[in-house]
Amino acid sequence: MAIRIITDSSSDISQELAAKWGITVLPLKIRFGDEEYLDGVTLTNREFYEKLVETDVVPKTSQIPPYEYQKAFEEAEAAGDDVICICISSGVSGTYQSACIAAQDHEEHVTVIDSRQFCISLYVIVERAVQLRTQGLPYREIIARLTEELKDAHVIAVFDTLEYLRLGGRIGSITSFAGNLLSIKPVLTIEDGVVKLLGKARGSRNRSNLLMENIQKLGGIDFDRPVALAYSGFSDEMLKKYVEDSRVLYEGYEDRLEYTTAGATIGTYAGPGAIAVAFFAKGK
């Protein structure tokens, strides 16, 4: 009997990386007007950003329905596997509820976890589950450890523009206009399962300083657990600039850093030019 780890594409884990880790990533759906795509399957991240900047259509993402989880759980059960299903925060999506509905007939061998995170903070949580499985921990112990460690998982992100947040209905037009006019970059996190504003920065140096300050407030990065960095859009130059400006945080641990592209779930509201850091805090 094996342990099967299932998550969703809001984690920004590509299908290629999922195959390498030996996990399943179920795609959310992305709709541009009348066109619907499977996140990371029929629409790559690059294609998503091309559509985002080239059209006037505001994309929409939709939750994974229960029957898709039901199919995945039945396949695992038929193979004799136990399942750990780690979902996007219930505070921003009904996907967790879909998984819970599907798990009702498989309670003995399926555990559904509300990560209370998404984007690369879900990425590092899933990778942590893979680490624990690789270490040979039994099914129930992995669940207990992972559930306990959720409180240590954090993400700090900075958006280059407020425009996509405004278009997505997340902030008012006046706030968006003032932010763009003054070149103010919002610094955000996920707290209690939803997005929270931590502060505002002007210029790349101030942005990096604010990111670093908030990471240090949380107790610093535990490099014995996964650390991931992501950027949205077409270029990673801004992310490289952040890492250079914040090298005091990562010095000696550069080989522990993982890089990825933020996908549609966060890209819909961030637009191009956002950067994010996800990690487990050491604790105070």
Image: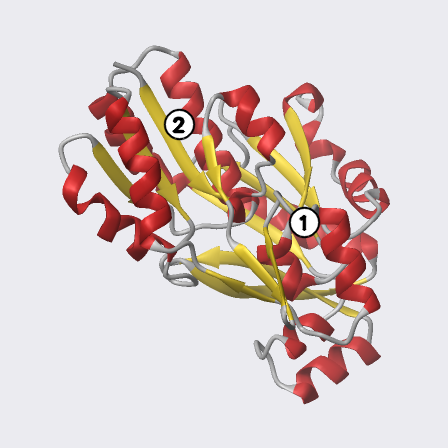
Q: Residues within 10 Å of mark 1 (few under 14, many from 20)?
A: some
Quadrant of the snapshot with the C terminus: top left
**Residue found farthest to the top:** 136
Q: Which tag, 2 or 1, sits closer to the chain's start?
A: 1
What mark, if any, has residue 129 been given in the picture? 2
Q: How many marks?
A: 2
Please report the residue visible at 51 percent of the width from the left and 46 percent of the height from the top. Answer: 27
Q: Amino acid at mark 1?
A: Leu
The residue lying toward the viewer, choosing from 247 and 224, is 224
Q: Residue 150's x, y, as percent?
A: 36, 40
Which-is-in-front pick, marks 2 and 1? Answer: 1
Residue under the point 83% across and 80% down: 181
Residue 273 in view: no
Q: Amino acid at mark 2?
A: Ala
Q: Is residue 163 visible?
A: yes
**Within 10 angstroms of label 2, few (less than 14), some, or many (20 or more) residues?**
some
What SS does tag 1 mark?
loop
Residue 129: image x %, image y %?
Answer: 40, 27
Residue 261 to residue 101: above or below: above
Q: Is residue 1 above or below residue 43?
A: above
Task: State the image coordinates of residue 256 (x, y, percent, origin top left).
Answer: 63, 22
Q: Which mark is residue 43?
A: 1
Residue 158 found in image quarter: bottom right
**Residue 252, located in which quarter of the rendered image?**
top right
- Determine whether, in the image, residue 253 is placed left or right of residue 219: right
- Secondary structure found at label 2: helix
In the picture, measured across the screen, residue 263 lies left or right of residue 225, that is right
Indicate the quadrant where residue 173 lies: bottom right
Q: Quadrant of the N terminus?
A: top left
Asked if the residues shown at circle 2 and circle 1 are in contact, with their CB atoms under 8 angstroms apart, the answer is no
